Image (cartoon, rainbow, N blue to C red):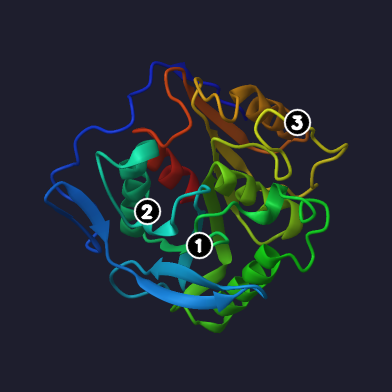
Amino acid sequence: MKRLVLLPGLLAGGCVSAEATSARCAVTDGVLSCSHETSILADGVEDRRVHWQLPEGEAPEAGWPVAIGFQGSLASAELNWEASADTPAGGLFQVEATDQLLAAGLAVITPEAPAAGLGAWNTNVPPFAGEWDGAPDDILMQSLFAGIEAGDFGPLNAESMVAFGISSGGYMTSRMALSYPGRMRRLVILSASWATCVGIACVLPDALPEDHPPTLFLHGGGDKIVPAFTMQAYADRLIVDGVEVETFVPVFIGHEWFAEAPGMLVDWAR
């Protein structure tokens, strides 16, 4: 199924809601912040911070379902946990997504990208784009999956995971379908396209993964960094393959989170 929506979008920013949705989050002096833990995982090159939090209350018998969020480049994963209306790239809405995921009963895990969170994910960076096995981000993900299964991040359900991300993190979200088949139940890709694409340079492979998870694409129609047509080509191929797909493209939005994104992400991830 495909839903293509072209709507006048809200500009990034705006007012912080009067109350946070999750008991883990709060608004103080115009800043929305969510409490979280930080663990360290090694990727073979550097130590990586992994920020995480569980919903409040008793975990389901199978463990909490998991949402893994991938940051954009040049922005720490800490920005998934604290932002205000002045935070660039619609950062407030990114934290609202964390808030709403926790309130909906999903644990949230946000690993840092390379270079202490200031680099880009390896997924579309040579030579790793074509030689993924053993890449630093592959080592990180293998360690992260092992930690989830071992209970290092609390009682989590490794059989019920979703991934989401923006920009470089959106391409990394697509990498979950390419390199970790069966791991993710659903994907939400913001301002990005296929795992090995980069901005306007986007060539899809001859065949996409047969078991590609259902995918929601959220993309600003005015995005000049990653043009929306690169996303649409990916979405269209998935539709031809019979994958459940939805797209939402607010026309006046650029390369950023936007007001509708948190609620749509949570609805898709449930």
Q: Is residue 61 visible?
A: no
Residue 200 at x, y percent in the picture: 68, 28
Q: Secondary structure at mark 2?
A: helix
Tell me: residue 228, above or below residue 150.
above
Q: Rounded to the nearest whole Å, what is the CA distance between mark 3 and mark 2?
A: 32 Å
The residue carrying mark 1 is: 112
> Is the residue 9 above or below the residue 140 in the image?
above
Residue 90 in the figure: left or right of residue 214 = left
Left or right position of 236 against 100: right
- Residue 97 in view, yes or no: yes
Relative height, residue 170 to residue 242 (above, below)? below
Residue appearing at x 33%, y 31% in the figure: 12
Circles 1 and 3 in contact, beta carbons < 8 Å: no
Please report the residue visible at 60 percent of the width from the left and 41 percent of the height from the top: 215
Q: Residue at x 40, y 73 (%)?
A: 38
Q: Which residue in the rendered view is the most extreme toward the right?
A: 206
Q: Position of residue 133 (x, y in %)?
A: 79, 65
Q: Nearer the viewer, residue 241 or 134?
A: 134
Helix, strand or loop at label 3? It is: helix
x 77%, y 69%: residue: 134
Q: Which residue is mark 2?
A: 79
